[in-house]
Image (spheres, rainbow, N blue to C red):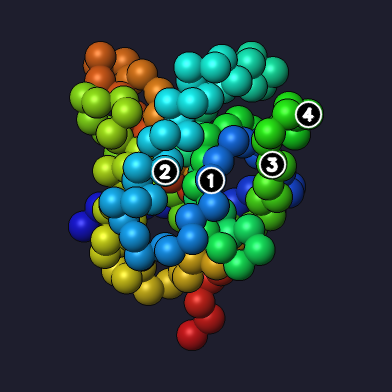
Amino acid sequence: MTTYAIKTISDNYKMTAYGVLLEDYNDWAGNAAKTAAKKAEITENGKLAELLALADGQEYQINYVIGGKAWRGFGVMGEFDAEGTVVLDFLAGDYIVVPGTGDDKDRLADEITGSVFGGLLQQITDYKYVGPGNSTFVKAADNGGFYGEMWLRANKIEG
């Protein structure tokens, strides 16, 4: 079983990001293509670099629900005024934190996401993911590879 921890965030926080609405949540290939196109666009036009410069430089991959539809994007911790971005609210409370390591920075966030939604959440019986979003970061690790974490807001299941 993939390891996880429960961490408590004491204050609400915001994230600012560029992203795309996903019309059909089950269209995995189409959604991956839309997400990759958005990442390429904001990387090539410098918008992501500008946003990273406003914050602490740490990029996050963010999944969120906006207007009842799935949304996926790339952004930073904090609230910033940048054209074309959305500011997302993340609430204080308990978070399921799932770590991962790998050699490919660009694939690690997706690998962690896949393990979480591909079975790990069903194995966690004392907490339930409640959203409305989650975020994943990846950074260089001391061993030359990469380290990442996915954070998902959760409620303790009383029982």
Question: Mark 4 packing: few (<14 Cα in 10 Å), some, or many (20+)?
Answer: few
Label 3: element kind: strand
Residue hosting label 3: 86
Q: In this view, does 56 lie above or below 21?
A: above
The N terminus: image quadrant: bottom left
- The answer to whether residue 49 is visible is no
Q: Is mark 1 on a helix, strand or loop?
A: strand
* N-terminal-most mark, 1 or 3: 1
Q: Which of marks 3 and 2 is nearer the N terminus?
A: 2
Q: Which of marks 3 and 2 is in front?
A: 2
Which mark identifies residue 81? 4
Which of the two discs, 3 and 4, labels the residue nearer the N terminus? 4
Q: Where is residue 70 in the image (x, y as percent from the top left)?
A: 52, 59
| Three-letter code for the amino acid on which mark 2 is drawn | Lys
Circle 2 residue: 34
Q: Local crowd at mark 1 within 10 Å, few (<14), some, or many (≥20)?
A: some
Q: What element carries label 2?
A: helix
Per the rendering, the mark at residue 20 is 1
Is disc 3 in contact with disc 4, using a CB cutoff of under 8 Å? no
Q: Do the residues labelled 1 and 2 touch (CB within 8 Å)?
A: yes
Along the viewing direction, whichever of 112 and 127 lies nearer the viewer: 112
Residue at 21% across, 24% down: 103
Asked if residue 96 can be seen in this view, the reply is yes
How far apart marks 1 and 4 lie (CA) works out to 18 Å
Closer to the camera: disc 1 or disc 3? 1
- Toward which corner of the image does residue 49 lie, by quadrant? top right
- Closer to the chain start, of discs 4 and 2, is 2
Above-or-below relation of 63 to 119: above
The residue at the point 49 percent across, 85 percent down is 159
Q: Residue at x 66, y 50 (%)?
A: 90
Inter-mark Cα distance, 3 to 4: 9 Å
Disc 1 and disc 2: Cα gap in Å? 7 Å
